[in-house]
Amino acid sequence: MDSYKKYNSYKAFTIETIILNEPLAFDLYINNSNRLVKFIKLGDTLSYDKKEKLLQNGVDHFYLSSHHSKAFDTYLTNHLGTVLSSPHLNKKQKSKIIYSSAIHIMQDMFESDISQSKIMIAKDIMAETIKQIISKNVTAASILQLSTHDYQTYSHCVNVALYSIGMAHEHGLNEAMIHKIASGAILHDLGKCKIDQCIINKQGKLSLEEFEAMKEHPQYSYETLISNGETCPEILEIVLNHHEKLDGSGYGRALREKEISHAAQIVTIADIFDALTSNRSYKEAESFYNALKIMKEEMKEQLNIKLVDSLIKMMGKA
């Protein structure tokens, strides 16, 4: 089961996210023969015995109503670090928790509303992800194995952030810069909320007019972050310049190599790689090999090939 599969207004996340024996501020449901059944009601707790019984019966996800999304956001903020610090979780379980948590908050932002508090939660999840990667509890590649590569804007943002973290870590950047890159990457496409959704979801090639409208989304992302209190120049530069290319062929300001930070170049590569390797309504995903070949041969004048090599190295560390 995909960690972000939806049943109408319900969202799924791995069972390992829930701390045992602590009263919950939301109802939890399980999938029983393709029908959601309330398993834990608000105020109750998940016991060890209940959890083990579910796992023995092949139930490894809970479902949460969108009505309780805000309460779950608060729960993630307060408990994600505690959950991930458990010595009983293996790499795959920790990877599932990180991925489903990031998917939850980004899906909520794109389908509900963007707010300063949600932006901070997304940053907090990325900070915890970086901590786990640096501690070698997980790798960016191990988390990305959970992606279905079916393109949604919210899952694309999560994937781009994970590729960017892995590349930056592999490239030897310091932790403070990796945090800024992760924040810029996971927030890079927020401006697409201001683009006509008929353009975003179009099944086919965009017309020239539609593409011109789409090209505005980096500026919209920048403005959205500014209006929500973002002041970090590195994060804002990443968001504004993630479609620029080294040869000046990108948008929106046709910048060239020396005008684009290494941080933005990393996110650009991550953005292109995830787009190439994702299934779209009008095209099948490229294999990792073909995507990298396209980037190294057809886009060699546009991209920093040393950073592409860092992407190749990090993908080998699942």
Image (cartoon, helix red, strand yellow):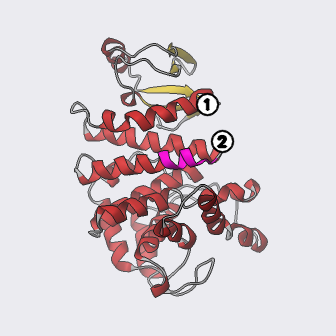
Q: Secondary structure at mark 1?
A: helix
* Outermost residue toward the right in this view: 209
In the rendering, at what x and y percent does residue 205 appear? 70, 66
Q: Which mark is residue 112?
A: 2
Q: Is residue 298 left or right of residue 307?
A: right
Report the magenta residues as a range. Answer: 114-121
Quadrant of the rendered image containing residue 282: bottom right
Q: Is residue 193 above or below residue 37?
A: below
Q: Which mark is residue 89?
A: none
Residue 167 in view, yes or no = no
Q: Circle 2 sits in a helix, a strand or a loop, which is it?
A: loop
Q: Amino acid at mark 1?
A: Ser
Q: Residues within 10 Å of mark 2 (few under 14, many from 20)?
A: few
Label 1 crowd bin: few (<14), some (14–19), many (20+), radius 10 Å: some
Residue at 45 percent across and 79 percent down: it is: 303
From the image, give the main secondary structure of the stretch colored magenta: helix
Q: Are marks 2 and 1 in contact (CB under 8 Å)?
A: yes
Q: Amino acid at mark 2?
A: Ser
Q: Is residue 217 left or right of residue 137?
A: right
Q: Looking at the image, tell me whether mark 2 or mark 1 is earlier in sequence order.
A: 1
Looking at the picture, how far across and down is residue 272, in whole percent?
A: 50, 67
Kindly tell me whether residue 131 is visible in this rendering.
yes
**Residue 98: horizontal and vertical position, in percent?**
39, 42
| Residue 277 drawn in magenta | no
Taking depth in this image into account, of 38 and 280 the one nearest to the observer is: 38
C-alpha separation, residue under disc 2 versus residue under disc 1: 9 Å
Q: Is residue 22 left or right of residue 206?
A: left
The residue singled out by tag 1 in the image is 66
Residue nearest the observer in this picture, 182 or 164? 182
Q: Could you tell me which residue is drawn at 61 percent across and 30 percent down?
A: 66
Residue 116 part of the magenta-drawn span: yes
